[in-house]
Image: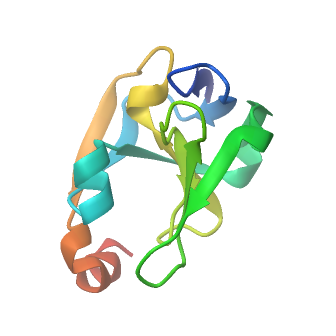
């Protein structure tokens, strides 16, 4: 495991995540919100993630089933991590929001057909 730091664009939100050794598994999703926001997922168990600052500056957004809680910095609008529907025991960290991006092993997730893709993913 290695430690990675990251956060939002303005620096109000900062976090530390413990990641597996590279290449780090990552998911590229084509659902409406991931495609529009350019989110590249690294799944991090809750126990391997620490929000170092900015909890008070996060604002949430839910859509569809409401199971996922998308968290955005209220100042700059960047979603550096969120609680995904697919992994309720983990955070999804945006690889683009890491201070230093590790080597990634990127798989595709068909979020436009979430139910079928999730079943195949399990």
The residue nearer to you, when weighing 21 against 29, is: 29
Residue under the point 25% across and 64% down: 31
For the residue pair 25 and 116, the one nearer the viewer reads as 116
Quadrant including the C terminus = bottom left
| Residue 85 point in image, percent of width and height | 50, 72
- Residue, far front: 75
Residue 12 image point, x, y percent: 67, 25
For the point 36% across and 30% down, the residue is 23
Residue 81, quarter of picture? top right
Give the color scheme: rainbow, by chain, secondary structure or one colour. Answer: rainbow
Q: Where in the figure is residue 48, as x and y percent of width and height? A: 71, 42
Q: Determine whether, in the image, residue 105 is placed left or right of residue 46.
A: left
Q: Which residue does the image show at 24% across and 50% down from the upper left? A: 36
Which is more toward the observer, 117 or 2? Answer: 117
Task: Give the answer, above or below, for where 62 lies relative to 12.
Answer: below
Vertical relation: 101 (above or below) 77:
above
Q: Left or right: where does residue 66 sit relative to residue 50? A: left
Q: Quadrant of the N terminus?
A: top right
User: Residue 64: x, y in percent?
Assistant: 40, 81
């Amino acid at each position: 495991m290695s430690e990675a730091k990251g956060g939002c664009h303005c620096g109000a939100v900062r976090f530390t995540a413990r990641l597996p050794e590279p290449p780090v598994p990552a998911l590229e999703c084509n659902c409406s919100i991931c495609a529009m926001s350019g989110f590249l997922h690294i799944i991090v168990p809750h126990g391997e993630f620490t929000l170092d600052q900015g909890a008070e500056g996060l604002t949430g957004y839910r859509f569809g089933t409401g199971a996922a809680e998308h968290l955005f910095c209220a100042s700059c609008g960047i979603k550096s991590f969120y609680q995904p529907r697919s992994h309720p025991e983990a955070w999804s960290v945006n690889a683009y929001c890491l201070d230093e991006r590790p080597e990634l092993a990127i798989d595709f997730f068909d979020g436009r057909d979430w139910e079928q893709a999730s079943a195949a993913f399990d």
